[in-house]
Image (tube, rainbow, N blue to C red):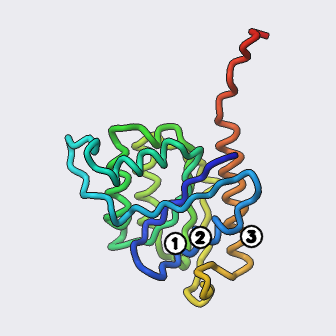
Amino acid sequence: MTVVLLISGSTRDGSTNTAALRTVQALSPDGVDAALYGGLTELPAFIPGDDGAERPAVLALREQLSHADAVLFCTPEYAGTLPGSLKNLLDWTVGTGELNEKPAAWISVAAPGRGEGATATLQSVLGYVGADVDPAICERLPVHRDHVGVDGLVSEPEFRTGAIEALNLLVRHATRNRVAPADPTGA
């Protein structure tokens, strides 16, 4: 089983970013456990020098990241960059290494000509924390609010096809990067 943690950078109810990741979760193939991270609003503000050991939300984030084989992000752009809440989440991983060498990618649901600041910043921060980002997996799959159904899922077939393709590529990337256990017989 490959575990992929899905992280939305949006805290807004009715977010197309979160709907996109819920859709990925709902359509995940057998053998993939796509888990939607739900603690973004509970994370305290990052304070340099605070290791987060006394903060349950930080410990929960780190545990989920540690157990994930890969991470898939989907985030809006606020004021030309990442939303502060997502940057805060990433800041909590800088000194602890949960994203170091972890396969990661993103899906952008922004309309053409929008969202580049967020994805550029995300790529920069993921590089800084040592995440293993394959840009060929990262996709722009615009989602209009009208394409989100009452079930909270994106109904547009082109999005669904592209999102599952990105998930499958990320899973393959994570699987390739797993170190095979040593043969106990020494053969």
Is 105 left or right of 176, judged from the image as shown?
Answer: left
Instruction: Confirm or deny contact between disc 1 and disc 2 (CB under 8 A).
Output: yes
Please name the residue shown 69% across and 18% down the image.
182
Q: Which mark is residue 22?
A: 2
Q: Which of the two discs, 3 and 1, sits closer to the camera? A: 1
Please name the residue shown 38% across and 52% down the image.
90
Residue at mark 1 to residue at mark 2: CA–CA distance: 6 Å
Q: Amino acid at mark 2?
A: Arg
Is 106 left or right of 97, judged from the image as shown?
Answer: right
Residue at mark 2 to residue at mark 3: CA–CA distance: 14 Å
Query: In the image, is residue 129 above or below residue 6?
Result: above
Q: Amino acid at mark 3?
A: Thr
First in residue order: circle 2 vs circle 3: 2
Q: Position of residue 114 (x, y in %)?
A: 48, 75
**Considering depth in this image, is 162 or 70 the residue closer to the camera?**
70
First in residue order: circle 3 vs circle 1: 1
